[in-house]
């Protein structure tokens, strides 16, 4: 049995990988790719939240929003710190990469328009993070990450509950209730995209083979739908999905994937799309990608410029 097959057998029998010496090259590369996506996603969630931070209706809301952003930076630090342990130059990853090379979700390349959208962000996008990282916490074979995710799992749950509280309160008033509906209209499918291409199109299986995660993309999407749809319905919304008793799973009522008008932040339900086009949209990045990455990198670049002046 070759080393790769032996490692897959061991992790599927419950072995935890603790050191680079325990890994084969395929495991190492799959782990690095996973941690990079996680780190980028956590860190780039902060700039869009900051776009409406000053709209917090009370001091308590503002403190909670700050706590959530601090959590997200901490979660990013965990992923990047693990990448450093795996031999990556994290300073270069964070401060030198071009904006369009970051691996954060496309949804994070948009500014938020109002406080209600921050609530929907927490309720839907942080729910996606909770689903993805909760799965990793439960199933991952990489011991250092599993231990770190104990903290992350609890904090992501706090984030999504904060979103639920904001949305429930907003539905009590006609003006903000309309904002909730408009936010759901563009954010619901965005959240579904967090889980990646459909299972039949996925070409790489290393994350599952090496037990870096437990469920497939579509399995994770179903898990997200199983809590997101009932919550949205419970506050009086009609999300574009329903539970099909015959198939024992959630079904979408609109094409997925479909084309998206980035200028209007509107899904074009009459124009179904392909995952190839969606991936290209991801690579092209959204309208605030450059600005948000610049916000992360600016301080480091300014400090380096000062150092050069001194020299």
Image (cartoon, rainbow, N blue to C red):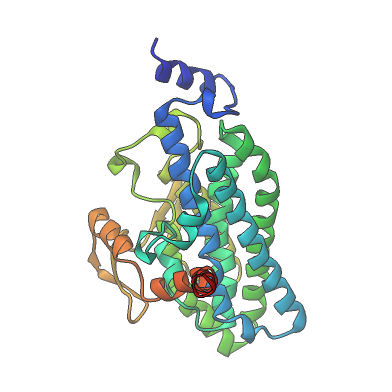
- Residue 252: image quadrant is bottom left
- Is there any visible trace of residue 236 in the rendered image? no
Left or right: 115 as drawn, with respect to 196: right
Residue for point 49% across, 26% down: 23
Up/down of 214 relative to 37, above or below: above
> Residue lying furthest bottom in this view?
175
Given residues 207 and 251, the one toward you in this image is 207
- Residue 273: image quadrant is bottom left
- Where residue 69 appears, x then y in whole percent? 64, 67
- Where residue 277 appears, x then y in whole percent? 23, 59
Left or right: 4 as drawn, with respect to 77: left
Up/down of 210 relative to 299, above or below: above
Left or right: 257 as drawn, with respect to 302: left
Given residues 213 and 238, the one toward you in this image is 213
- Is there any visible trace of residue 304 in the rendered image? yes
Up/down of 142 relative to 281, above or below: above
- Where residue 194 appears, x then y in whole percent? 44, 56
Left or right: 223 as drawn, with respect to 73: left
Residue for point 59% across, 53% down: 130
């Amino acid at each position: 049995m070759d080393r790769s097959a032996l490692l897959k057998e061991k992790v599927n029998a419950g072995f935890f990988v603790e050191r680079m010496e325990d890994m084969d090259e395929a495991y190492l590369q799959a782990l690095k790719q996973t941690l990079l996506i996680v780190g980028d996603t956590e860190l780039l969630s902060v700039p869009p939240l900051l776009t409406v931070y000053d709209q917090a209706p009370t001091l308590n809301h503002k403190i909670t929003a700050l706590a959530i952003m601090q959590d997200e930076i901490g979660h990013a630090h965990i992923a990047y710190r693990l990448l450093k342990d795996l031999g990556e130059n994290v300073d270069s990853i964070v401060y030198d990469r071009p904006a369009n090379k970051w691996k954060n979700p496309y949804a994070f390349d948009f500014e938020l328009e109002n406080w209600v959208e921050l609530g929907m962000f927490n309720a839907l996008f942080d729910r996606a993070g909770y689903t993805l990282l909760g799965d990793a916490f439960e199933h991952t074979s990489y011991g250092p990450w599993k231990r770190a995710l104990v903290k992350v799992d609890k904090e992501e749950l706090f984030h999504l509950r904060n979103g639920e509280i904001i949305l429930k309160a907003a539905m009590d008033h006609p003006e903000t209730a309309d904002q909730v509906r408009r936010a759901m209209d563009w954010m619901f499918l965005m959240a579904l995209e967090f889980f990646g291409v459909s299972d039949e199109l996925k070409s790489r299986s290393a994350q599952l083979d090496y037990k870096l995660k437990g469920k497939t993309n579509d399995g994770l999407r179903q898990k997200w739908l199983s809590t997101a749809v009932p919550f949205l319905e419970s506050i009086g919304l009609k999300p574009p999905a329903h539970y099909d008793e015959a198939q024992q799973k959630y079904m979408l009522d609109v094409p997925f994937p479909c084309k998206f008008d980035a200028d209007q932040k509107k899904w074009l339900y009459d124009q179904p799309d392909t995952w190839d086009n969606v991936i290209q949209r991801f690579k092209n990045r959204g309208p605030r990608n450059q600005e948000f990455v610049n916000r992360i990198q600016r301080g480091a670049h300014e400090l380096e410029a000062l150092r050069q002046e001194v020299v």
